[in-house]
Image (cartoon, helix red, strand yellow):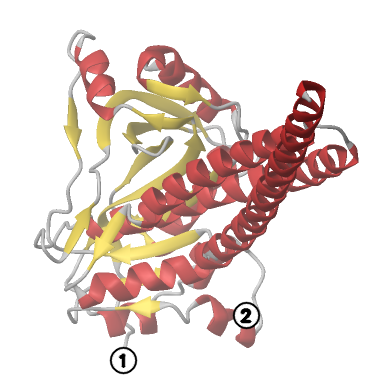
Amino acid sequence: MQAPEPPRVASGEVIAYRLFDLAYGIDLGRAEAIWRERPGAGSARKRLHATPPKAVTYDVPPVVLTLEPVALALDDGSTLTAGVTARLYDFGVVSLALAVPAEDLGWPEFTERLNAVNRVVGAGSGLVWAELTGRLRNLLHGALVRPSASVLEEDYIVGLVRAFDRPMLASEIQDRLDLVPLLSGERRALSEGARQDLLRKRFSYYTDDLVVLTWDRAFLYEPRGDSDVIDVLEVANAQLLEMRYYDELLDGELPRMYDLVETTRRASGLLSSRRFARLARRLYALVAEVTELTEKVDNALQVTEDVYLARIYAAALDLFRVRVVSAAVDRKLAIIRDTYAALYEEASSGRAALMELAIVVLIVVEIVLALLRR
């Protein structure tokens, strides 16, 4: 009996993401106003389409901007046109997405298209992204609150299939299609252990949808056209980027703090308590700023009643190690808080000692004046 023809991808996309930290924050209302001043430009606030608002909501919905398409020159000499969108998050992150159509492709061709796009725009290929972010920085400069010079970025690539040339169940996809080359980018055969590790984060809600997540890639089969899973993955990447930014910021701040504390403690004199108080205020301001932003990042997406999306979101946070980096940020903030408390106590002790000295001096003066009157 002749084996059935392998399924072909009738409709899908390869979506490459690159996320950047542009600023301490973005005034989204101002950004929308600036963008609408451009001829023919439009913007929208992003919301999850297939999920009830009370189940999953953005804390502050990002602004979605549609940019002009770009041409991608692949390494085989061919050229593909990619649609470009940008999402602006109020905590200072911009997520750029390049979407390359994939229609009427065999599975090996679809896999190769994703890998080819990744070779052009993946990690280490920053020309396209640099041009797009430079354009956004210039256009939206008035909406950026304390623009950042950070070079941190995150990338992610998704193979999205909306339809095969025949109806497919999730179990059939896993049995008949080799997802490993798409999820790994490797051309050589992987060991069984490596294959199982790549495929362990699999999710299905209906019998005919499938999500497979890895550290930097994902495969989605979504015949109903919902984009909620992709949106959740993007938010998780944005949270990782911001947590990495604050982790590095505190890494640089801790040695500087130790040096300042040591210098302040070596200083002597009547004004030493004032120096302690000034340093304590500086550390308090740093803690307040970082705490405010990290809480905003933590609450960027709130998943309550949608169990399926909650599982995917939790798996993404686990895979991307968002909680690990967040815990590191919390530990460093705790060190700074403890240092602030110690400095404040020393400043208070210094002021108390100064007050006691002043009282003693006043008593001595009163005694001397009393003796002189006699």
Q: Residue furthest front?
A: 374
Report whether 28 appears left or right of 193.
Answer: left
The image's mark for residue 194 is 2
Is 196 placed left or right of 137 in the picture?
right
**Viewer can see residue 186:** yes
Query: What amino acid is found at the position of numbered circle 2 in the picture?
Result: Ala
Q: How crowded is the residue under tag 2: few (<14 C-alpha within 10 Å), some, or many (20+)?
A: few
Which disc number belongs to residue 1? 1
Residue at position x 69%, y 40% in the image: 355
User: As shown in the figure, which amino acid type bears the numbered disc 1?
Assistant: Met
Residue 230 horizontal/vertical position (percent): 31, 56
Q: CA distance from mark 1 to mark 2?
A: 33 Å
Residue 34 higher or lower than 226, as above or below? above
**x, y percentage for residue 207?**
19, 82
Label 1 neighbour load within 10 Å: few <14, some 14-19, many 20+: few
- Marks 1,2: beta carbons within 8 A: no
Q: Secondary structure at mark 2?
A: helix
Left or right of 210? Residue 120 is right
Q: Which quadrant of the figure contains the N terminus?
A: bottom left
Which label number is shown at residue 222? none
Please tell me which residue lies in front, 276 or 307.
276
Q: Is residue 290 above or below residue 34?
A: below
